[in-house]
Image (spheres, rainbow, N blue to C red):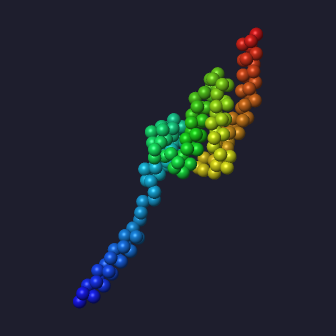
Amino acid sequence: MNKNLFKKVAAAMVLTLALYGCQSQPSGNTKADELYEQMITYVEEGNFSEALKTYNFNKEDLRDYKDSEAIHTYAQARFQYDSLINTDSIDNQMDAFTNELDTIADDYSGEFAEDIKDFKAELEAKLPEVQKAYDEAKAAATE
């Protein structure tokens, strides 16, 4: 009788472990997943300010999570660029944008790889124009 009881208890334990192992487990850090998806949505919408807020208010959850730092860097550069594009200050900021974007690896293949590549190209195309305006302003100031 003792042997039968042992077999039943052992079978129940194996069944319990098997059922527990089949349950769906959370896929990592769900809070970070949600925040990351929120950042992506904001960037896709062109709402760089909200993407930055999402990252900045949740750095502990998003730091080193997937490619969130590259997305943050891209959002930061786009936000600054978009804020200054129609002002005289853009001339002084172009180097800052390109330097900031250069911190994203050339082989970056994350969520916004094509957008980042296109934005870098856009900035590089504007550099000669900005340099010319800067040189003209500098020459006019020394006259």
* Residue at the farthest top position: 143
101 or 46, nearer to the observer: 101
**In the picture, residue 12 is in which quadrant?**
bottom left
Can residue 44 be seen here? The reply is: no
In the depicted structure, whether residue 27 falls above or below residue 61: below
* Residue at the farthest left position: 1
12 or 85, nearer to the observer: 12
Q: Report the side of 136 relative to 49 (left or right).
A: right
> How far from the left and from the top, in percent, is residue 69?
55, 44
Can residue 108 be seen here? The reply is: yes
* Residue at the farthest bottom position: 1
Q: Residue drawn at (63%, 36%), measured in percent from left and top? A: 100
Q: Residue drawn at (72%, 31%), measured in percent from left and top? A: 127
Q: Report the side of 33 relative to 20 (left or right).
A: right
In the depicted structure, whether residue 69 falls above or below residue 29: above
Quadrant of the rendering where the C terminus is positioned: top right
Quadrant of the rendering where the N terminus is positioned: bottom left
> How far from the left and from the top, in percent, is residue 73?
58, 40
Q: Residue drawn at (64%, 33%), measured in percent from left and top? A: 97
